């Protein structure tokens, strides 16, 4: 078939050796199609490069071909990576993405989100932390039979599709790397208390320290909320202690950057007098000097997978995709040195 010619539903029907109505049922994700037939039609669609007319589908199925990203997160870089990963899948499938900012403290959030879905005929949701840990919200979505996938839940919810990263293992490994360089006086800045990642990153740190029989100084452990200002304020508090740590491990790069500012204001040399560690490998990690040692989390890939999971549940043309945990990577740069250096 000439590549210049548009592939039609009739071409798919002929290639898969099924009726046009059967192809239409597969496209519209109707349930009265056998798995073998569905697989054969999907293979033909993929082989021929068939692109259904979303406007026509929308009129027939009363679907909007819009999915929504629910978020309440001050880290703009994290959100940008999440959006980028989802939009990659949207571009491939003909869906559009709607952003819906939420307030995790809103007691009526579940009801408001259900109304939002109804008003705009949203086909499905991708839920990010801390919203992904709100049991009441997720229960509302379940009761309303809303399709959704979750990014970074705290407990790998068995009833929901999710993507996660190995925050505990990564934090544990980075702490052991710090200790291997001779450091035993280590401070830690936690993230937003409603984010499951915050507790996992802190637990990875505290377990590694405890297992090495290193005392954990509570005055060197502070809570931030993933913003630069919270890292700056926490850094000032730690560095105002009579005795200061030789390393401060912050739960994300923006808080680590805040610590760096606090240290420099106090005339503390980095890394010879204070080493600083971040998490996420945001662009700022390389832009600072000395550049930050950090943990690279594959946020775009996680968001892309979350979108595929969601569309696998709502769209007959999308392949069913399983929940998955993604692995992070230690990135060692100039902000961490041996204590003897």
Image (cartoon, rainbow, N blue to C red):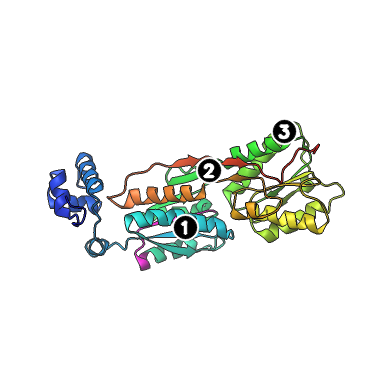
C-alpha distance separating marks 2 and 1: 17 Å
C-alpha distance separating marks 3 and 2: 24 Å
Give x and y (percent) for residue 245: 80, 45
Q: Which residues are magenta?
A: 118-129
The local secondary structure at tag 3 comes to helix
The local secondary structure at tag 1 comes to helix
The residue pinned by badge 2 equals: 165
Q: Nearer the viewer, residue 67 or 193?
A: 67
Q: Residues within 10 Å of mark 1 (few under 14, many from 20)?
A: some
Q: Nearer the viewer, residue 129 or 89?
A: 89
Give x and y (percent) for residue 88: 41, 54
Give x and y (percent) for residue 130: 55, 54
| Residue 337 visible in the shown view | yes
Direction right: furthest residue: 242
Q: Residues within 10 Å of mark 2 (few under 14, many from 20)?
A: many
Direction top: furthest residue: 212
Task: Answer above or below: position of 93 versus 155.
Answer: below
Give x and y (percent) for residue 268: 82, 52
Q: Nearer the viewer, residue 241 or 284?
A: 284
Residue drawn at point x = 18 percent, y = 52 percent: 2
C-alpha distance separating marks 3 and 1: 37 Å
Q: Which mark is residue 180?
A: 3
Contact flag, marks 2 and 1 (Cβ < 8 Å): no
The residue pinned by badge 1 equals: 83
Task: Answer above or below: position of 262 versus 199.
Answer: below
């Amino acid at each position: 078939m000439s590549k210049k010619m548009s592939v039609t539903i009739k071409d798919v029907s002929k290639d898969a050796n099924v009726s046009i109505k059967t192809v239409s049922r597969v496209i519209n994700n109707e349930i009265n199609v056998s798995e073998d037939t569905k697989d054969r039609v999907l293979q033909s669609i993929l082989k021929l490069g068939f692109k259904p007319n979303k406007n026509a589908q929308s009129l027939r199925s009363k679907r909007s071909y819009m999915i929504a990203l629910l978020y309440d997160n001050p880290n703009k870089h994290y959100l940008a990576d999440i959006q980028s990963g989802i939009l990659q899948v949207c571009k491939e499938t003909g869906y559009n993405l709607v952003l819906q900012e939420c307030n995790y403290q809103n007691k009526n959030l579940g009801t408001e989100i259900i109304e939002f879905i109804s008003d705009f005929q949203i086909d499905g949701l991708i839920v990010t932390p801390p919203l992904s840990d709100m049991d009441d919200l997720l229960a509302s979505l379940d009761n309303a039979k809303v399709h959704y996938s979750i990014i970074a839940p705290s407990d790998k919810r068995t009833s929901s599709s999710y993507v996660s990263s190995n925050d505990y293992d990564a934090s544990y490994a980075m702490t052991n790397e710090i200790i291997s360089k001779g450091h035993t006086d280590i401070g830690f800045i936690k993230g937003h208390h409603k984010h499951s990642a915050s507790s996992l990153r802190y637990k990875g740190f505290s377990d590694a320290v405890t297992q090495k029989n290193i005392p954990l100084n509570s005055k060197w452990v502070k809570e931030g909320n993933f913003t630069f200002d919270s890292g700056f304020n926490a850094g000032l508090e730690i560095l105002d202690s009579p005795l200061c740590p030789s390393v401060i491990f912050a739960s994300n790069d923006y808080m680590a950057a805040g610590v760096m500012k606090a240290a420099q204001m106090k005339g503390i040399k980095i890394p010879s007098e204070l080493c600083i560690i971040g998490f996420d490998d945001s662009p700022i990690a390389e832009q600072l000097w000395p550049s930050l040692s950090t943990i690279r989390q594959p946020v775009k890939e996680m968001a892309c997978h979350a979108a595929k999971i969601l569309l696998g549940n709502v769209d007959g043309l999308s392949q069913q995709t399983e929940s998955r945990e993604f692995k992070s990577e230690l990135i060692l740069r100039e902000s961490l040195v041996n204590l003897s250096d």
